[in-house]
């Protein structure tokens, strides 16, 4: 098994770090791009084990860090650039993903990847990102969402928008790192400026490629009803509920085991079967 780490230019001047995991066997393989969610990063928890499992099943598995996710190339697993985190928005992540697609379209052969078989996979807010990208980019041939959000506008529910506008910043507490992480008002402005492009319900209804919607029944971060709603908007999608799974399918950070938690193993098996047969 091979793992290649590299950086490419991001959409707003900061680099995108990514890793590519695959088994070199002189066989052309489908490419899976996995997008992390809010307060996430490519090496979170058990994500590397997930990548290895896909590689063992003859996929090229790509994990990018969005350029403004708050990590850096020097410290890819720590939120050391909170200014970048605060200035992140949905458009930056979509544009970053487009640049990753550009890179793979041009360089897939280096990693034995088939650039005509590019699949997107996203967790949580990353699920919303891949839904939007799959709708706007015809290079995407299959779609998988794990515990996905259903509407970017839900992110702003319950917030005091007037106070946020006046003060310019609100803070979200990260209970794992004990950090108060800034969110600048530009996030809301970006959403309103690009509402049509960032309309997940509308994009969901337009998806015509094979789409697996997978959710945990005990998800307290994004309730499984969000997945049901996505499936309702797109009846051609495949809906899978893992009854007792939480938001991360049993994973946590750091993850010290050398095997996947049971719910993640089930999610991976469902996803690999879908991508090979769906």
Image: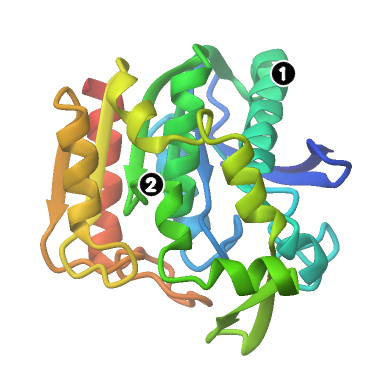
- CA–CA distance in space, label 2 to label 1: 33 Å
Residue 37: image location, x then y, percent? 51, 56
Vertical order, 262 against 152 (above or below): below
Residue 187 drawn above or below residue 211? below
At 76% from the left and 44% from the top, the residue drawn is: 16
Which image quadrant: the N terminus?
A: top right
Image location of residue 254, percent across then percent down: 53, 77
Residue 57, disc: none
Residue with the most extreme bottom position:
178
The residue where tag 2 is placed is 151
**In the depicted structure, whether residue 102 falls above or below residue 16:** above
Residue 107 image label: 1
Question: Is the C terminus in the top left, top right, bottom left or bottom right quadrant?
Answer: top left
Residue at 51 percent across and 75 percent down: it is 253
Q: Residue at x 51, y 19 (%)?
A: 136
Tell me the quarter of the picture where residue 223 sits: bottom left
Residue 65 in the figure: left or right of residue 205? right
Q: Is residue 276 left or right of residue 44?
A: left
Q: Considering depth in this image, is 56 or 88 the residue closer to the camera? A: 88
């Amino acid at each position: 098994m091979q793992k290649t780490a590299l950086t490419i230019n991001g959409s707003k001047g900061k680099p995108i770090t990514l890793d590519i995991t695959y088994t070199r066997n002189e066989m052309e393989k489908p490419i899976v791009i996995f997008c992390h969610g809010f307060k996430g990063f490519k090496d979170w928890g058990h994500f590397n084990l997930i990548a290895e499992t896909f590689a063992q099943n003859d996929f090229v598995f790509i994990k990018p860090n969005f350029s403004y996710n708050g990590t850096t190339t020097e410290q890819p697993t720590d939120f050391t650039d909170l200014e970048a985190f605060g200035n992140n928005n949905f458009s930056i992540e979509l544009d970053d993903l487009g640049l990753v697609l550009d890179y793979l379209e041009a360089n897939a052969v280096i990693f034995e990847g088939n650039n005509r078989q590019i699949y997107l996979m996203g967790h949580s807010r990353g699920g919303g990102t891949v839904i939007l990208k799959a709708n706007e980019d015809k290079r995407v041939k299959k779609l998988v969402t794990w515990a996905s959000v259903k509407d970017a506008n839900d992110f702003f529910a319950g917030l005091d928008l007037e106070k946020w506008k006046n003060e310019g910043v609100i803070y979200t507490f990260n209970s794992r790192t004990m950090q108060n992480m800034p969110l600048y008002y530009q996030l809301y402005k970006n959403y309103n400026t690009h509402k049509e492009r960032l309309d997940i319900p509308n994009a969901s209804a337009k998806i015509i490629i094979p789409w697996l919607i997978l959710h945990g029944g005990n998800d307290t971060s994004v309730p499984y009803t969000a997945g049901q709603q996505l499936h309702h908007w797109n009846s051609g999608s495949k809906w899978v509920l893992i009854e007792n799974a939480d938001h991360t399918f049993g994973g946590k950070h750091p993850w010290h085991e050398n095997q996947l938690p049971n719910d993640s193993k089930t999610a991976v098996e469902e996803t690999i079967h879908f991508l090979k047969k769906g």
